[in-house]
Structure formats: C-alpha cells, structure tokens
Amino acid sequence: MEIRTLSDGAVWLSPPTAADTDAIIARCQDPSIGEWTSIPVPYGPADAEKFFADFVVPGWAANSPTWALRLAANGPVIGMIGLEQKDPTACEIGFWLAPEHRGRGHMSRAVGLVCGFGFATDGMGLVRISWRAFVGNYPSAAAVRRNGFRYEGLARLGGWQRGARRDEWLAARLHSDPPGPAPDWPAEFTANRETVSHG
C-alpha cells in the first residue's frame, strides 16, 4: 500500500520517522499513556526501536499503517494513531495523545481522517473498523463515538496488559455507517467528562 499523509488543515497525520524517536520516547513516559495502552513501562530506546521495526516499517506493506499526529505538516509528534489489519476488509484502530493536547478535538479529527482513508475505495477499501479500550478510558470512547462507531459491548477480561487481564469495551464502524455521532451508547459514556488518554 502506498504511504499516505492525511490532513484536514488542523491536524496532520504522517508516518513517524527516526527523527521522531526522542519525542516518542518522551511522550511515552506519561503515566496515563501507560495506564491505557499496552506499551512497555518504562518505555526506552529499545522499545522505540522495536516499534519502528515491528510496526511502522512493515505496517504499510501489511495494510497496517501507523501515523504520527502533528499540529503542522512538519511539527513535533503529539500522538500516534494506526490501523491493524484483521482480515482483508477489516482493521482495528488504536491511538494515544499527549496529555497537554487532550480535550481539544485533535484525536477526534485524526480518527475521522483515518476512517475516511480506511473506507475510501481509493484508500484501503475497508468494510469494518473496530475499536477496543480498557474499561474506564472514556475520552477514547468519545473520540470514536463522535466518528460513527457503534457500541458493541463489554469483553470481560478480554484485554491483556503487561501480564494481566482487563475488561474491555468494544465498538465498531461499518463503511455504511454515517460519520457523525453514533447513537445507542450506554448513558455512562455521555455522562462522563473525564480527560484521560488513549484508545
């Protein structure tokens, strides 16, 4: 698959490069990113090297692209977002965002861009994009709910994080689902206004 940079004029998504390594390592020191993701904790240079070798470099060829989230075309990394292929027409979306940039809609914009590319016939031509997050990560849920993801339930102890099982929420958007806010999420998601991280 051809490498693509995505932008709506407010956020830019481009593949991370070796020049971003120090910024990625610094961002991943934030405790909330470690709390809601499965990244190694503590996160060091060897982990960043493995991230590039195992995910970034081979990802585009394997229909599992990873983008760095920036606020300018050549700006510093403030987050990460990617799609992991599950089968030829389905991927799972995942992302994290630096704490000082949360609550401003940046990740919601990024999710919209990635879904647009994922579903486009001149993009990845996907039928389904799924999402999962550890229970309690309301901001991650908000980002996908604003982009048309439908709530699909709770997977009891469905997640694995550094040697322990955790409950997970599940949701997905189909290519036929409209892009705006999705209905029918449980009331707790619309009531909760916490500002934690990732998805």
Image (spheres, helix red, strand yellow):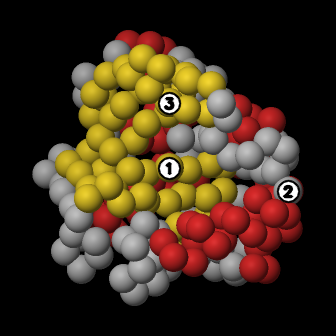
Instruction: Give above or below for 83 relative to 103.
Output: below
Q: Is residue 44 left or right of residue 15?
A: right
Q: CA distance from mark 1 to mark 3?
A: 13 Å
Q: Nearer the viewer, residue 176 or 157?
A: 157
Q: Amino acid at mark 3?
A: Gly
Q: Determine which quarter of the picture holds residue 12.
A: bottom right
- Label 2: element kind: loop
Mark 1 vs mark 2: give the one in front: 2
Q: Which residue is mark 2?
A: 44
Earlier-in-chain disc, 1 versus 3: 1
Q: Is residue 122 left or right of residue 113?
A: left
152 or 144: nearer the viewer: 152
Residue 121, position in %: x, y?
19, 74
Residue 60: tell me if it is visible. Answer: yes
Residue 55: which numbered mark, if any?
none
Q: Position of residue 37 (x, y in %)?
A: 63, 40
Q: Specify which label sits upstream in the sequence, 3 or 2.
A: 2
Q: Residue at x 29, y 41 (%)?
A: 172
Q: Which residue is mark 1?
A: 94
- The residue furthest left is 176
Please name the residue that numbered disc 3 is placed on.
Answer: 159
- Residue 124 image point, x, y percent: 28, 71
